[in-house]
Amino acid sequence: MLLRKINIFLFLSVLFFLVGCSEKTEEQSIEEQKTDKKTPKVNVEVYSIKEQKTPLWVEFSGKTEAYKDVSVVARVKGNLENRFFEPGDYVKKGDKLFKIEDSEYIAILNKYKANKKKNQASLKLAINSHDRYKPLVEKELATKEKLDQLVAEKEQIEALIKADESTIKQAKLNLDYTLVKATIDGTIGMNLVDIGNMVGPNTENTKLANIVKSNPLYINFSPSGDDSALIAKYKSELKPKIVAHVPSRDSIDERTYKGYVDFIDNKTNESTGTVSMRAIIDNEKQTLLPGTFVEIKLFLSDQIPIVALSPKNVMENQLGSYVYIVNEENKLEIRQVNILYAFQGVLVIKRDSLKDGENVVVSPLSKLREGIEVVFKHVDNPTLKQGK
């Protein structure tokens, strides 16, 4: 009897336990269902990745340099008598610039001319003597030694005349140098020496002025080694085209200057890690001066396939740059991307980082985590607007 009561007690205890567990499990299930209903899917905006073909430019800063920069110098010594220009004038090759006192050089030229005339008279006499004496030698009425002497005298005088011609030529040059002329077309600067000063070799005043030719105009710039490699890889022309403009805070100066790269150095500067390059631009209206800092866009290719991202959608983690994408299950997935370079306000990435049609999350980007389910809405791809 006692054993039967114990068995009944144990049976009822187990039964109550099982009923309690069942009720508890049902309560938990109901609670979890309620919780699931309380956790809505996250709404996000996305844009679809699309490989695009776009003109490729890279941007640099540079400094303009005169196409030609020539010093006007005094090549002969003398007092500076006159100036024929105003500082800032545009002068042409051959225009008169300065006059150096020339009386001394005129006298020297006249002296050499007189020497030449004297020697020409002596030559005429020597020729006549030679011509009279030669027949006598042929008839053996005079010695051959005398004829040889006359020939030597004639040749000596001819040599003197050649020397006279050389000194006259130099004297004429020196006289011409007293009138200092422009050797190139360009804008002349301030006169560096005032009228009345002694100028020329062996004086303190050899340089008189400076002429700058600024059309066309050079631009010197120094891309990094990586940028140079990019240029070498993608440039479609031997001399890539460029567009330059002067950076302006108020955007008043909107002028642009077109040209092309005419020089790329054959080595990298070891101390700076850059490569020297030079472009040449049209400056017909002379609106851009040498020594001006400019910004350059260097054209590499007409149509290059790229995959681009907006910088606003790219974040950083320990592995590098990443974006959130929405996968086929409508869940968020972190995708690491390999950024190649920045271009026209977008980030160009390796084409195998993202595929055509994949959806990149635009907003919101805060409080997102990988694996959560989302409801997404498509917006316009901003890189398709900026990359054109």
Image (cartoon, rainbow, N blue to C red):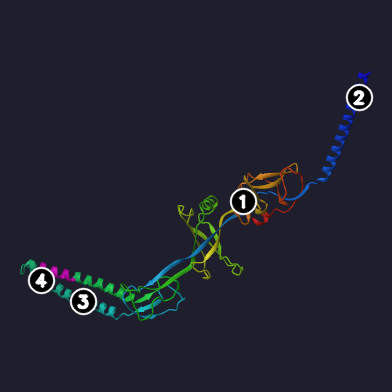
Numbered disc in front, either 2 or 4? 2
The stretch drawn in magenta includes residue 26 = no
Residues in magenta? 147-157
Crowd around label 2: few <14 · some 14–19 · many ≥20 (10 Å): few
Identify which residue is drawn at 85% across, 40% down. Answer: 31
Q: Secondary structure at mark 2?
A: helix
Judging by the rendered image, the residue that carries numbered circle 4 is 133
- Up the image or down, 329 lies above or below 229; here it is above
Q: CA distance from mark 2 to mark 3?
A: 155 Å
Q: In the drawing, what numbered circle is on residue 262? A: none
* Residue pointed to by mark 1: 348
Residue denoted by label 2 = 9
Callout 1: SS: strand
Across and down, in percent, residue 120 comes to 20, 75
**305 versus 246 height, above or below:** above
Label 4 environment density (alpha carbons within 10 Å; few <14, some 14–19, many ≥20): some
Q: What amino acid is labelled 3 in the image? A: Asn
Q: Nearer the viewer, mark 4 or mark 1?
A: 1
Q: Which residue is mark 3?
A: 115
User: With respect to residue 22, does 50 lie above or below?
Assistant: below
Distance of mark 1 from mark 3, alpha carbons? 81 Å
Query: Identity of the amino acid at label 4?
Result: Tyr
Drawn side of residue 263 relative to residue 323, left or right: left
Q: Nearer the viewer, mark 2 or mark 1?
A: 2
